[in-house]
Structure formats: structure tokens, C-alpha cells
Image: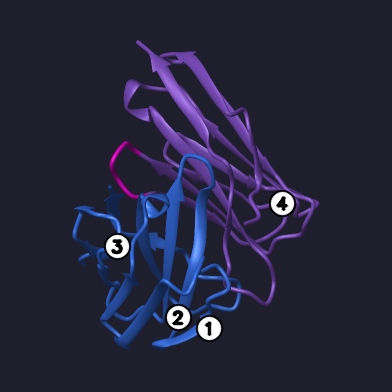
Amino acid sequence: GQQLNQSPQSMFIQEGEDVSMNCTSSSIFNTWLWYKQDPGEGPVLLIALYKAGELTSNGRLTAQFGITRKDSFLNISASIPSDVGIYFCAGLKSGTYKYIFGTGTRLKVLA
Amino acid sequence: DAGVIQSPRHEVTEMGQEVTLRCKPISGHDYLFWYRQTMMRGLELLIYFNNNVPIDDSGMPEDRFSAKMPNASFSTLKIQPSEPRDSAVYFCASSLDRMDGGELFFGEGSRLTVL
């Protein structure tokens, strides 16, 4: 099935550093969701975005709905060890309920 | 409120056996989704329901897979007969109906191993 391109695929960062990741597509989306998945668990919803240009925060996390509606960005400020996990984006096209998921960004935080 | 509840959490079975995975969506949610997650293919949508009616099953890999939603609080995904390549984590998710797409809430998943 179709997947969205996420980058980077994985990253090692030092505790306290800021993290940026993005999700891109050739298609236009009406909704973007960002999830975090811990090993052995289901994806947990972090942030939902519904309008182009929208910037939404959830604690140390900030996500943006790209102006072109073909991309979205997630930033984590002052990373901590519990930020370790896989981050997924998901996009939804107009007129459908078939969310398409990104390939994931695996984050590892070095204490 | 309870989240999406799936059972079993883990299932190990032998090739050829029937497997039934169960899901209880969040109360009041109109949509229910079944996803499969593998290292190679990531999260794939298998089928989704709206108000208990299957809307799109184009992601169901073969006739060996079937899904039902007899009422608003219960759904099953059945694989018969199972094959080793069906080994994966199967997630159920639910959402409310909204014009711009509802937020998807996932269960903990059912990890299936077919020997």
C-alpha cells in the first residue's frame, strides 16, 4: 500500500537537544496526525492538524501542517530519554477515511 | 474512558489453523479500522467500517481474511487458514465521524505468530 515518506529514518541525539522530522507526499492532504509508538505498544496520538499552515503544540512537541498541504513537520524540544520510540505521521485525503501512514522515524536519545 | 481494547495480545498458532482477533472500539466512535504492521510494509489498512458497515476492504490481502462488525462495540478479524506470512501485529483503531477526518485511536495490538 501507499506510504508517506518520513525523514530522517532514524536519529541519535543527545539528551536536551531539539529534534526535527518531516513527512512528505506527492498528494494533498486535509488532515495530518502524528503518533509515537513504543516497543510492544500501539501508536499513541500526539498531535492532530486540520488546516494548512496550522501550528499546534503539545508540551515540548510542536507540529505544523505545511502550506502546500503535501507535508508536515514535528519538532521536539529539549529531548529526554523517554522520547525514545518511533514517530509516525499519517495523512488523510479529502473525501476518504483511509489514513496513509509514514514509514516512521526511529528516535534514540543518548543520556 | 477505556481506550480501544484488543484481544488476544499475543497469539502463536500453526500454519493452517484459524485465527480470530477481537476488538472493542471506544464507545460512541463511528469508525473502526483494522491495520496490519510489519517491518517490511509498515502500517497497512486492511478494512474499515462506518456504523458497523464495511466501507472499504481493498486492503484485505486474500480471501483467507475476513472481518465482521456485528454491533457498534465489537469487531473480529479472522484468518482461515493462517500462513506464516500472516505473522504481524494487527491493530484495531476507532474514530469519531467528522468532516475533516477524525482522530484515530489505536489499541495495543495483537501480535500474531504463525509457525
Q: Nearer the viewer, mark 3 or mark 2?
A: 3
- Report the amino acid beneath label 2: Phe
B94 w.r.t. A79: above or below: below
- Are marks 1 and 2 in one subunit? yes
- How many discs appear? 4
Q: Mark 2 points at which residue?
A: B49
CB under 8 Å between discs 3 and 2: no
Residue segment shown in magenta: A38-42
Neighbours of disc 4 within 10 Å: few (<14), some (14-19), many (20+) = some
- Are marks 4 and 2 in one subunit? no
Q: Mark 3 points at which residue?
A: B16
Residue A58: x and y in percent read: 45, 44
Name the residue nearer the viewer: B35 or B24.
B35
For the point 40% across and 32% down, the residue is A85
SS of the residue at dot 1? strand
Q: Is residue A57 left or right of residue B52?
A: right
CB under 8 Å between discs 1 and 2: yes
